[in-house]
Image (cartoon, rainbow, N blue to C red):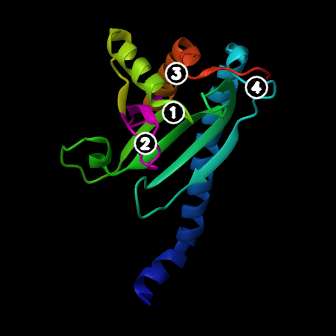
Amino acid sequence: MNEEFITNGIKNDRFLKALTLVDQFESEMVREIRNVAEATAEQAPALFVDDPTPQKSVNLRRNSPPLGNMRMDTEMSRVNASGERLTWNLAIEWAQPEIHGHDEPSDQALSVVLYKIKDCPMEDYQRVKQATRQESRWDAIQFDDDVWNSDWGIFYIPVTNGPEITDGFQTLQEHFLEFGEQFGEPASTN
């Protein structure tokens, strides 16, 4: 046991303050993601099931990519060719920069806001990716493979502070509202 480290953690409640900070950060981020997901479902009800309550998933302090994430899954009214319902996944994620092709030297993780469509046909992702590249208003959006080794691609924006997170989620929301109908096909029932 590193007694000096343990003593510093106990002194002035540093460990407890750190836990409080983590809890507060997580609560704020989850609230922001949920608000964007709910607002999106309200603005485009035809893209979502009748009760599109976002479901939270938080994975922090990992040793493999990604290093951590907070996300909301919202069930869509659209399906793939196999009849599997698509899910809109909205998240903030931390990864080593090289995971997303950012090769510049950095002593910190790359933070990104992102969305992906779970169970989405890859050709739909590729088509939306191409259309996105053709419009300069989407220049902030980057593309990559999903680090969870799924076959879905992601739409993401690197962020470094609170205002960038807010702006990034707004841009991703607008992008999804424009292109959401291009993922999968309408389900026979909601």
What's the amino acid at mark 1?
Lys
Q: Position of residue 30 (x, y in %)?
A: 63, 42
| Cβ atoms at labels 2 and 4 below 8 Å apart | no
Comparing labels 2 and 3, the label whose residue is closer to the camera: 2
What's the amino acid at mark 3?
Gln
Between discs 1 and 4, the one toward the N terminus? 4
Query: Which label is found at residue 116?
Result: 1
What's the amino acid at mark 4?
Val
Disc 4 crowd, CA 10 A, few/some/many (<14, 14-19, 20+): some
Residue 9 vertical placement versus 95 (above, below) = below
C-alpha distance separating marks 2 and 3? 21 Å
Q: Position of residue 178 (x, y in %)?
A: 53, 12
Between discs 3 and 4, the one toward the N terminus? 4
Give the residue at x 47% y 34%: 114
Q: Residue 146 vs residue 76: left or right?
A: left
| Residue at mark 4 | 49
Comparing labels 3 and 4, the label whose residue is closer to the camera: 4
| Cβ atoms at labels 1 and 2 below 8 Å apart | yes
Residue 20 vertical placement versus 165 (above, below) = below
| Residue at mark 2 | 146
For numbered disc 3, what is the local secondary structure? Answer: helix
| Residue at mark 3 | 170
Q: Which residues are magenta?
A: 144-163
Q: Residue furthest front?
A: 82
